[in-house]
Image: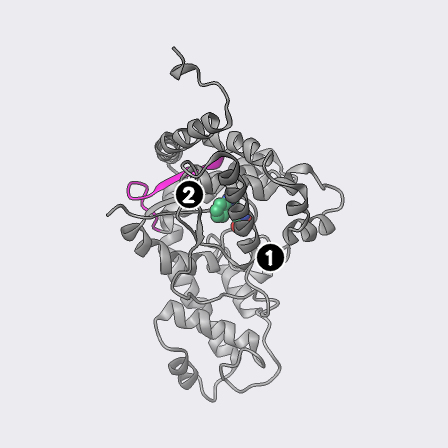
């Protein structure tokens, strides 16, 4: 039986975080055996906010190296950068012409981002979810793992597929489903433990980046917001901050939360923070070493990007060709 196709990307903004690390170790390595997996760096999506060209260039290199350092195998998976596959931008146009503005007006992420970003409300920010639909549909992805914040975009992608099917028939585009993976741990912000740890949080103290120095990691974990009580217990309602630290501790150590709570009875929050900071540093150390090696070998990174892009293009171009035919555009190579 053919493997199902799974596709996911991260926008090249901010920093990949401990939350991404935990999501990755929990899912990626298992998925790469069971599914046909495509992972890409969404560098075109990053342009919806103002970017310094040099910094964007460095960040794209860095994200790609981090994917590899996290354990994504470039042979078992298709790993690439969005801009290296021009079909994304091309399919984006076709889909843009199928998407009613009313549907885009409803996107809460656009509303939030444009409220925060009043000086740069560009059309790309508005049509962002259509490009995301193109990313998914080019590869006939069956499933897409999405966080809460991207659910609405995946819904829109499904609407676009319906519009396409109604107009052009159902043979070319596959209807994607959300991927409900193993219920992984939710890693929360270190500064506001009621919201998710976000890679583009403006407050650097709210997340641990995968490539933070041990000194920074120590500082961020020790500075994590907790309550003013002293009793060690897991209670997401009353002790969101402490519970978040316990969750991270549990995932990284493999111990159950209850065990950790027992171990620290009578001790202070500071003890947990100090031990957790060491644990996070130790856990990230091998990833960081691998990352440093990769970043010192730009030739290897470029080669790996290149072969990922070729694999991706081979598939993407087939879909785009079928789409162009469906829409009635002339295909020169099939006309006698
Ligand atoms: N918008 C997603 C994010 O910021 C990244 C993304 C772009 C994506 N294209 C995608 C995720 C396609 C899944 C599928 O997190």
Q: Position of residue 180 (x, y in %)?
A: 42, 60
Q: Residue furthest right?
A: 119
Earlier along the polypeptide chain: callout 2 or callout 1?
2
Depth check: give the residue in front, 161 or 287.
Answer: 161
Q: Position of residue 276 (x, y in %)?
A: 45, 70
Depth check: give the residue in front, 52 or 33.
Answer: 33
User: Which residue corresponds to mark 1?
Assistant: 204
Residue 84, magenta (yes or no): no
How did the renderer colour the structure? one colour
Circle 2 packing at 10 Å, graded few (<14), some (14-19), many (20+), is some
Q: Is residue 222 above or below residue 317?
A: below
Residue 80, magenta (yes or no): yes
> Residue at image x 64%, y 54%?
202
The residues colored magenta run: 71-82
Q: Position of residue 8 (x, y in %)?
A: 44, 47
**Which mark, residue 174?**
2
> Residue at image x 56%, y 66%?
190
Q: Position of residue 9 (x, y in %)?
A: 47, 46
* Quadrant assignment for the C terminus: top left
């Amino acid at each position: 039986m053919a493997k199902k196709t799974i596709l996911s990307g991260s926008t090249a903004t901010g920093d990949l975080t401990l939350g991404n690390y935990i999501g990755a170790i929990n899912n990626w390595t298992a998925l790469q055996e069971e599914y046909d997996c495509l992972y890409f760096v969404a560098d075109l999506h990053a342009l919806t906010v103002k970017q310094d060209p040099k910094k964007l260039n460095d960040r794209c290199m860095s994200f790609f190296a981090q994917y590899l350092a996290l354990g994504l195998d470039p042979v078992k998976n298709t790993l690439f950068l969005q801009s290296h596959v021009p079909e994304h931008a091309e399919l984006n146009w076709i889909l843009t012409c199928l998407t009613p503005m009313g549907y885009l007006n409803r996107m809460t992420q656009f509303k939030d981002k444009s409220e925060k970003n009043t000086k740069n409300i560009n059309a790309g920010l508005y049509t962002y979810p259509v490009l995301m639909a193109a990313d998914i549909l080019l590869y006939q992805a069956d499933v897409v793992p999405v966080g809460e914040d991207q659910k609405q975009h995946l819904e829109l992608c499904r609407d676009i597929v319906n519009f396409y099917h109604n107009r052009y028939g159902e043979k070319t585009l596959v209807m994607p489903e959300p991927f409900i993976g193993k219920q992984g741990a939710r890693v929360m912000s270190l500064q506001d433990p009621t919201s998710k740890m976000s890679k583009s949080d403006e407050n650097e103290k709210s997340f641990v980046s995968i490539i933070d120095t041990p000194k920074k990691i120590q500082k961020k974990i020790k500075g994590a917001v907790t309550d003013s009580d002293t009793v060690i217990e897991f209670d997401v309602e009353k002790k969101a901050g402490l519970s978040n630290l316990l969750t991270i501790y549990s995932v990284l150590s493999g111990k159950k939360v209850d065990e950790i709570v027992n171990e620290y009875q009578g001790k202070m929050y500071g003890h947990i923070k100090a031990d957790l900071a060491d644990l996070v540093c130790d856990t990230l150390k091998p990833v960081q070493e691998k990352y440093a090696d990769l970043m010192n070998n730009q030739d290897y990174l470029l080669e790996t990007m290149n072969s990922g892009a070729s694999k991706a293009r081979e598939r993407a171009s087939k879909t785009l060709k079928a789409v162009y035919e469906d829409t009635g555009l002339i295909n020169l190579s099939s006309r006698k």
